[in-house]
């Protein structure tokens, strides 16, 4: 077989070089050269899918049919995808190793009994997949598995099996014989993804690609994959906790604001349809240092529990530690409490934790964090029927947050009696609330209303 021509290209400026070089002679960047296929021989045309050539059309003449979506047997995933899986779409499913990517997608493959599914795994043997399937406990007569890593062989099998849904367990293990570099290298990943994209677009078969996330949080190193695919899903969570969040960071067929929540059980992943209920600990008596925040994850309102522990520093330097919440934000809130409200926290250890192993970024959590810190510092419990949604500014003012109506109705639905929000959110408050809405503008006002 004649060897395909490859060449090395600088990823920064595009300079071509026949050999790999460490430093680009043109832009002086280091480590930017990546091998790419520059010309494919005709003999490969069978393996590599080619796009049929097209003529330009007037955009007004094109009939926009409803994109063909088919719902998957998983409500959370359907919602995150924007209402079902679109035919011919390429979905990148990223996440840290061990988070449950293979489990979730195998579960989908097994429960989609109306579809012929091919699950290609380059990571596990057939026996391992079978064991996992037994653990999940669903059987599907239409689910095929293939343990193969060479993309040309995979395409051959695809032509025989003709699946309706293709799942690739890890793009990092795929290998195209057109390029010399090792599986997992950028050029391999890019070439394989491009081939899979062409396959998806020409056959209209939706393809899920699992991608491991590197230490810095991006999928397969530089963002080489994200721009090529239609949808990027991220599976996150803490492997020591049971909850997993599924987010979209890119979606050509829907919004990127959706969030799916799963619980890892002994028999696969379970959809969590009422997350607020599971994230809040039900306690017999109120305890100090706990406050409930009404946050939104994308467009989904969610009640989460913030826990704080304030104690006298045992050693000279007080410790500040935070799990699930930005540590710098915590330091800022402590500084505001100290400077604007006169609380002496300078000699105290402060520990903050968001229950359930969830990471929050919504600034509306601030008010609950402050309430939890003060409740712990003063040893006064907050009623478990109260919740909070407000951002705190540097001058100690309580700033408005978005989607306040959704937060209020979620709090009401969950049976909360009072919600503390910024008074600047007043206009957006829905009428006819059963829940009492407490509006506060300054920290002092907030404390006197909360602790009396
Ligand atoms: P896995 O899907 O292999 O992760 P990834 O493909 O993202 O690397 O899942 C790994 C973890 O999930 C593993 O530590 C075991 C756990 N697990 C369960 O808790 N319950 C189950 O039913 C299964 C199949 C796995
Ligand atoms: Mg896996």
Image: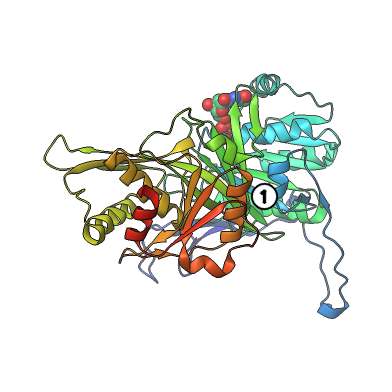
Residue 177 in the image, given as x and y percentages of width and height? 63, 44
Instruction: Identify whether 106 is placed above or below 65.
Output: above
Q: Quadrant of residue 114?
A: top right
| Residue 443 appears in the figure | yes
Judged from the image, the secondary structure of the residue bearing numbered disc 1 is helix
Say which of 430 and 98 sits in front: 430
Left or right position of 295 against 269: left
Q: Is residue 39 above or below residue 289?
A: below
Crowding at dot 1, Cα within 10 Å, few <14 / some 14-19 / many 20+, comes out as: many
Q: How is the image coloured?
A: rainbow
Q: Is residue 102 left or right of residue 201?
A: left
- The residue indicated by pointer 1 is 80
Can residue 19 be seen at all in this image of the molecule?
Answer: no
Name the spot of residue 59 as percent of width and height, x first.
Answer: 81, 78
Point 88% across, 78% down: residue: 61
Q: Please state which of residues 334 and 153 is positioned toward the viewer in this rendering.
A: 334
Report x, y in % for residue 103.
Answer: 63, 31
Residue 40: give x, y in percent of width and height: 68, 57
239 to 324, vertically: above or below: above
The part of the image, by quadrant, that contains residue 408 is bottom right
The residue at the point 22 percent across, 52 percent down is: 343
Residue under the point 64% across and 39% down: 274
């Amino acid at each position: 077989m004649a060897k395909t021509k490859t060449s090395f290209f600088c990823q920064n400026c595009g300079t071509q070089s026949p050999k790999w070089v460490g430093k680009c002679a043109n832009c002086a960047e280091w480590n930017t050269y990546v091998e790419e296929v520059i010309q494919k021989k005709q003999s490969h045309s069978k393996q590599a899918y080619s796009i049929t050539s097209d003529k330009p059309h007037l955009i007004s003449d094109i009939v926009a049919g409803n994109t063909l979506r088919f719902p998957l047997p998983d409500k959370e995933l359907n919602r995150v995808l924007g209402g079902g899986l679109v035919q011919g779409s390429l979905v990148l499913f990223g996440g840290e190793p061990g988070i449950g990517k293979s489990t979730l997608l195998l579960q989908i493959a097994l429960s989609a009994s109306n579809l012929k599914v091919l699950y290609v795994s380059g990571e596990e043997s057939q026996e391992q997949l079978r064991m996992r399937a037994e653990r999940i406990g669903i059987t599907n007569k239409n689910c095929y598995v293939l343990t193969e890593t060479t993309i040309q062989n995979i395409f051959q099998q695809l032509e025989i099996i003709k699946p309706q849904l293709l799942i690739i367990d890890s793009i990092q293990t795929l290998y195209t014989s057109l390029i010399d570099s090792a599986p997992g290298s950028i050029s391999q990943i890019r070439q394989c993804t491009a081939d899979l994209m062409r396959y998806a677009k020409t056959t209209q078969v939706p393809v899920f690609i699992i991608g491991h996330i590197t230490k810095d949080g991006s999928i397969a190193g530089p963002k080489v994959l994200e721009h090529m695919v239609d949808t990027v899903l991220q599976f996150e969570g803490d492997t020591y906790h049971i909850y997993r969040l599924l987010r979209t960071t890119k979606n050509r067929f829907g919004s990127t604001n959706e969030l799916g929540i799963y619980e890892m059980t002994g028999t696969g992943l379970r959809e969590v349809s009422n997350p607020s209920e599971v994230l809040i600990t039900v306690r017999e008596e109120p305890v100090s240092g706990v406050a409930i925040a009404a946050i939104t994850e994308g467009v989904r309102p969610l009640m989460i529990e913030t826990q704080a522990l304030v104690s006298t520093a045992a050693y000279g330097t007080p410790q500040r530690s935070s799990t699930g919440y930005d540590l710098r934000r915590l330091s800022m809130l402590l500084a505001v409490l100290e400077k604007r409200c006169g609380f002496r926290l300078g000699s105290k250890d402060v520990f903050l934790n968001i229950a359930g192993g969830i990471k929050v970024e919504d600034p509306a959590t601030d008010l609950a964090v402050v309430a939890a810190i003060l409740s712990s510092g003063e040893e006064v419990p907050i009623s478990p029927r109260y919740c909070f949604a407000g951002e705190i500014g540097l001058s100690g003012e309580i700033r408005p947050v978005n989607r306040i109506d959704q937060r209020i109705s979620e709090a009401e639905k969950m049976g909360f009696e009072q919600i503390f929000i910024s008074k600047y959110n007043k206009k957006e408050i829905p009428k006819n609330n059963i829940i009492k809405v407490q509006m506060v503008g300054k920290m002092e006002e907030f404390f006197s209303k909360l602790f009396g």
